[in-house]
Image (tube, grey):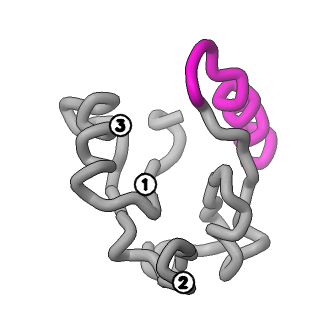
């Protein structure tokens, strides 16, 4: 997917925690164009964070937010794509997502 699209990780996790995982997935920092964290989210309550896509400074008509928590894209419902969380084993959701995004494009 990186060959076709800009990929930005936007997580409600703390930066130190997220970076440990992202550095394991992408040690050379070539897969993800940017990383945004909890401090970039809008805090609704002490445990509820919403991702404001306007912070990306991208054309929102060409931007999607893929998240396992639908409330995360509450500010941009038209841009949200729900996905099941990944825990272990083969990631069927990621393969289905790639097919969906190719059709969407």
Task: Residue at 54% x, 34% y: name it.
Answer: 1
Mark 2 and mark 1: Cα distance apart in space: 24 Å
* Tag nearer the camera, 3 or 2: 2
Task: Residue at 71% x, 22% y: name it.
Answer: 92
Which residue is identified by label 2? 45
Which range of residues does the magenta coloring cover?
A: 87-105
Task: Residue at 67% x, 58% y: name it.
Answer: 69
Which residue is identified by label 1? 8
Q: Residues within 10 Å of mark 1 (few under 14, many from 20)?
A: some
Judge left or right: residue 20 versus residue 89: left
Q: Check the image and report above or below for 13 versus 57.
A: above
**Residue placed furthest toward the front:** 46
- What is the quadrant of residue 37 in the picture? bottom left
Which residue is identified by label 3? 31
Q: Secondary structure at mark 1?
A: strand
- What is the quadrant of residue 102 in the picture? top right
Judge left or right: residue 45 versus residue 69: left
Main secondary structure along the magenta-highlighted residues: helix
Q: Secondary structure at mark 2?
A: strand
């Amino acid at each position: 997917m990186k060959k076709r699209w800009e990929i930005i990780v936007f997580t409600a996790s703390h930066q130190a925690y997220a970076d440990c995982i992202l550095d394991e997935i992408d040690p050379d920092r070539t897969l993800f164009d940017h990383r945004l964290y909890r401090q970039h989210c809008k805090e609704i309550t002490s445990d509820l964070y919403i991702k404001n896509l306007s912070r990306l400074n991208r054309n929102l008509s060409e931007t999607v937010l893929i998240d396992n928590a639908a409330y995360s894209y509450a500010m941009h419902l038209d841009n949200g794509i729900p996905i099941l969380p990944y825990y272990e084993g083969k990631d069927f959701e990621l393969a289905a997502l790639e097919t969906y995004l190719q059709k969407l494009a």
